[in-house]
Image: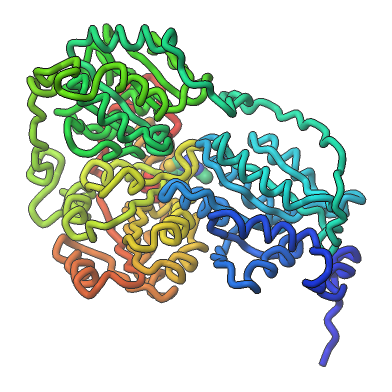
Amino acid sequence: MTAVADTRPASDRIAAEARPHDETRVPTVPQAVARAVREQDTLLFGLMGNGNAHFISELTSTGFPFTTVRHEAGAVVAADAAFRTSGRIATATVTYGAGFTNTLTALSEAALARIPLVLIVGDAPTTGARFFDVDQTGMAAAAGVETVRLDDHDPAAQVRDAYARAAAESRPIVVAIPYDLVEAPVRGGSAGPAAAEELPTPVGQSAVIPTTLTAPTDADLAPFLAALRGAERPLIVAGRGVVDSPGAPGALRRLADALGAFIATSVMARNVAGPEGDLGIAGGFARMERAEIMRQADVVLVVGAGMNPFQLRYGTLFAPGATVLQVDARDHQRHERTDLFLASDAGTALGALAAALGVTPEENDRPDGGWRARQPIPAAPRLEATKADGTVEDGLAEDGRLNPRSMALALDRILPASRTFVQDGGHFIGWVPMMCSVPDAHSHTFVGTAFQSIGLGFPSAVGAAVARPERTTVLVTGDGGGLMALADLESFVRQARSGVVIVFNDAAYGAELHQYAVRGLDEEAMLIEEVDFAAVGRAFGAEGVKARNLADLEALRDWVARGAEGVFVLDLPISRNVVAEYMTESMAGAQPAPLPLPVD
Ligand SMILES: Cc1ncc(C[n+]2csc(CCOP(=O)(O)OP(=O)(O)O)c2C)c(N)n1
């Protein structure tokens, strides 16, 4: 047998060849880290390498559930999606160097979207950088993410503190294990005060996230109450801040009832307070007839929603004269349309406002039911009958390819009702939010939109499938983003108890076609040779169908009838001629928006 030269750096070889640590002795640093992780109510996603092998082994050898992904970006994305779909803080782990740098897009997304998670990584030894080490702390800082480099004094305490702060401050934190500590025993004692780490302020983002917001005082609330009491047509717009804040959905319901207010939500907060008075999605995915009601509001209370241009429908969501009140847990999100701003956790502010306005019919500010009782919500028109957009009964557009609107409508009826939608970004992004219902506010997740990144879909589906295994996880992706994330189709097929992959396959980077080809840019780089995702899915062990007409969706109906077990890949070769309303609206502006996507 030929001996294979060990090309690992000497420091790696020494650690790998040392005797495994005896459990009865003082714990090693990775053992202490693993113990602290075990104490958390957390889910673990990762991909191993030299830097995290000891840590992972400590957990898997004691039966701690570990979901491996096939690309490190997927470890962070899956942890991110697990939080968004379940509210549980999740953990990602990758090795040092290239393992870590592969996570940077996903880390940036988590930082911008304010997702709490802990990423446990290998890192350069405390004794100094090896020839292949890079400045991981600096790279994470550039993405707005703090790194806690462990020492061998009390690493478990450092890890516990990282989880506590990630949760309290709603942000990702990197925990780095220096490579010379992967077999080192915990020494105990104190490492002395850690040097304060200076983080640069990422563009467009405040570095200061208030950790403990004080409860609003009566003086803070008084102008809000005055404006709400004086409102003829009050509207409350709720975002992900309401979904993530304990007690906030109930308080939102009480406040809306007390005011007779309509509710609209961001796409990520759909169904947050139940159906009563719910106008659906505010923003680019709003149904026109409902957006017109939103525009009639004279006072709008926006809670836990970022008010990005897409959410505000490029400034057309509210009437120019409407008074806009904003409550947000982060003070930098004040929007130029905001007349009154309150920095507060959503649940605290909504609870205080609801209590002040009265919750019983006798105390109620609007015993007559207010605007909501006067203004009927028009029924949604049956969009599939709209011939003007090219739709015909067989679900085909004029060019003979599938009409994405008809497909989304059909899917709403075919997919199991107990479902979590997970979406990548692209032109297709609006079809499902506009046409398909969801069971609750944790059921529609977009990972990538805060950073405007495509290609995070498949690992998001992995995180959702692990966090909410009782539901069918439905990944909705384009062909471009799907190909980018393809490695973790394997993870999804392996991991999902019940999963569906819907590929809106326009054989193109469609968003680019609709934004730039229409302006005369050459199409060549925007086109994709058509891929058969059903065949790719079958190769990974899924069932798969490439549909050519509406009737072909019966295969999915059949899979659902058989118990919806395993993963079903539905490739929908759609027409490029059916352009989403939001895209048309964004193109009506002077410059196309980068990619108009919902954030929170
Ligand atoms: C990581 C990353 N690369 C490139 C882009 C630019 N981009 C935005 S949308 C898009 C096209 C997405 O194509 P596809 O997934 O097929 O969806 P479609 O737009 O066709 O519906 C591209 C390339 C991006 N947002 N993120």
Q: Is residue 524 above or below residue 54?
A: above
Q: Residue at x 75, y 38 (%)?
A: 138
Q: Is residue 389 or residue 172 the one in the foreground?
A: 172
* Placement of the N terminus among the 4 image quadrants: bottom right
Can you give x and y, in whole percent of width and height, for residue 545 in the image? Answer: 28, 69
Q: Which residue is drawn at 21% across and 19% down?
A: 259
Can you give x and y, in whole percent of width and height, for residue 27 in the image? Answer: 79, 64
Q: Is residue 79 above or below residue 10?
A: above
Residue 483 seen:
no
Q: Which residue is drawn at 33% across and 27% down?
A: 587
Can you give x and y, in whole percent of width and height, for residue 460 in the image? Answer: 46, 53
* Placement of the C terminus among the 4 image quadrants: top left
How many labels, in total? 0
Quadrant location of residue 308?
Answer: top left
Residue 394 seen:
yes
Q: In this view, does 309 lie above or below 138?
A: above
Ligand 1 lies in which image quarter? top left
Q: In this view, does 6 lie above or below 240?
A: below
Q: Which residue is drawn at 8% across and 53% down?
A: 393
Q: How is the image coloured?
A: rainbow
Say whether residue 579 is left or right of residue 239: left
Q: Is residue 25 or residue 7 the one in the foreground?
A: 25
